[in-house]
Amino acid sequence: MNIYKSDFLVIGSGLGGLLSAIELSKKGKVNLLTKRDLQESNSSYAQGGISAVTNLDGDFDSHLKDTLKAGAGLCDEEVSKFTVQSAPAAIEKLASIGVKFDKKNKAYELGLEGGHSERRILHSSDRTGLAITSALIRRVRAEKNITVFSYCQAIDFILENHPKFYCPKNNSCRGVYAYSIKEKKINSFIAGKTFLATGGAGKTYLYTSNPDIATGDGFAMGWKAGLDLGNMEFVQFHPTCLYSAQARNFLISEALRGEGAKLKTQDGKEFMKKYSPLAELAPRDIVARAIDSELKKTGAEYALLDMTFKSSDFIKKRFPYIYRKCLEYGVDITQKPIPIVPAAHFFCGGLKVDRNSATDMKNLYAIGEVSCTGLHGANRLASNSLLEAAVFAIQAAKSALDDYANISSKSPRYYIWDYRQTRPSNEEVIISQNWREIRTLMWNYVGIIRSTERLKKASKRMEVILEEIEYYYNKYRPNVNFVELRNIAITANSVIKSCLKRKESRGLHYNKDFPKTSKKILNTIVNRYE
């Protein structure tokens, strides 16, 4: 086992991780861990853009109002206000690093997406996330104070104290144990402050828009350390992913609907006006449930998204990546509608954090989708996720740098895990079997429309699976497949527990046994000691 030390440790290479690493490197040494290569993250796959008030006609109040409305009563209004008002500075920071957003006549070209009352979506063609992360990666590679460890899977936190029962508020994070995929061994990364930017957990579900790395790593690590997970029932299903046997998880941006694309059944009938006066521009929870409802009525496997009324030149210029990608799968979107299905996309809940994105454990921050800042409430407003990651990466780094003297003054105390007491496993079939079962169970029982009976059945089955995993974890040496299995199991279990606690339907959580929204506005909290 190797031991690597730094002032700051950042886990994840999405917008939140990359930007916080850049900010932290101004004052100290940063080790940056990424599970695959630097470019592989949820942020890199974001197509639509980043929401921000940047034009003279826009205003903070309308952006705040749209955010609160989408959040269905559960947004933290002060956090939401802070985020919206911090947006221009975050955009300026990204631009100064080299992110090039599309402009028209020297002003930002702004898009419109569902839930927004006006155009305020900055974009870079239809691959905004890639444009942002590419610019940040170039800066990261140029910074002498940042050392990148690729193909490095974080396993668990290294804590100052490893008691039988964790009390996060009386403990301190000293870094993480991480599995080196290339070296096939576990190393220790010690740091004064740790930044968790591990993204979400779309792979918990059978169908998702997320890449393979989105396995709930940060959720599970926090849960194991005794941290609270908040509002995990609010899983956003993106309404429109390409339906294709070859395309595993290709998302069709909401920006198409912002430009007028219509949802239709396979016989060509539009249906969204039956579900909302906003039709295709309704918030994602409404659109996803509408599509799910139409598919169940007809027994069809997919619906259609029709953009063919727009000129071929417009489509190719505004959505070049989507056009080329669909063409690879035999769909010319200038000539015929796109076959689509909803898929798990974004977790609005996560590790509870304060206004600086600090968790209840000393020296541990959580940024982006892994965190629960209070911005998204019960339903994320489109394109607020990249904004949240940027704003809180800057804010968390500022908080950590302000406290820099306290992490440099003395050598921290920590415990090193001797994993050599375990032995390699030759039972990989157990991992693959449980992986398939969890994802199918989540899709069928904890999907877009839920019921109490299905949730209880899912809960009972997850208890058995988690018991098997705990036995396996204590006996065999961890590898990437097993660590990811453990993480999706813990995440799935937290979602189920949160769903059972909410005796209403609100935002992204719809339980047909409790179809009404309660007048009481409550957050749900789960942790390992319940």
Image (cartoon, rainbow, N blue to C red):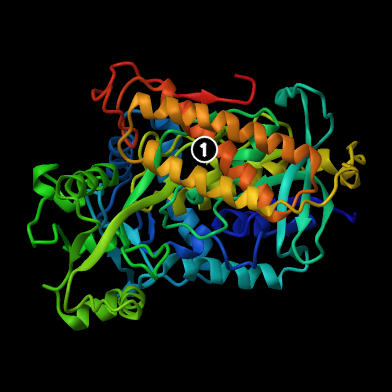
Q: Nearer the viewer, residue 480 or 398?
A: 480
Q: Would residue 138 appear left or right of 59 to someone viewing this image?
A: right
Q: Residue furthest top?
A: 520
Q: Position of residue 299 (x, y in %)?
A: 19, 50
Q: Is residue 199 above or below residue 243?
A: above
Q: Position of residue 444 (x, y in %)?
A: 37, 41
Tag 1: residue type? Ala
Residue 310: image quadrant is bottom left
As helix, strand or loop, the secondary structure at mark 1 comes to: helix
Q: Residues within 10 Å of mark 1 (few under 14, many from 20)?
A: many
Q: Nearer the viewer, residue 353 or 514?
A: 514
Residue 72: image quadrant is top left
Q: Residue at x 57, y 44 (%)?
A: 488
The residue labelled by disc 1 is 492
Q: Would residue 176 appear left or right of 102 to someone viewing this image?
A: right
Q: Nearer the viewer, residue 383 or 187?
A: 187
Q: Position of residue 258 (x, y in %)?
A: 22, 60
Q: Would residue 128 appear left or right of 413 to someone viewing this image?
A: left
- Quadrant location, the N terminus: bottom right
Q: Is residue 310 above or below residue 499?
A: below
Q: Is residue 357 above or below residue 227?
A: below
Q: Position of residue 104 (x, y in %)?
A: 29, 74
**Is residue 463 among the parts visible in the rendering?**
yes
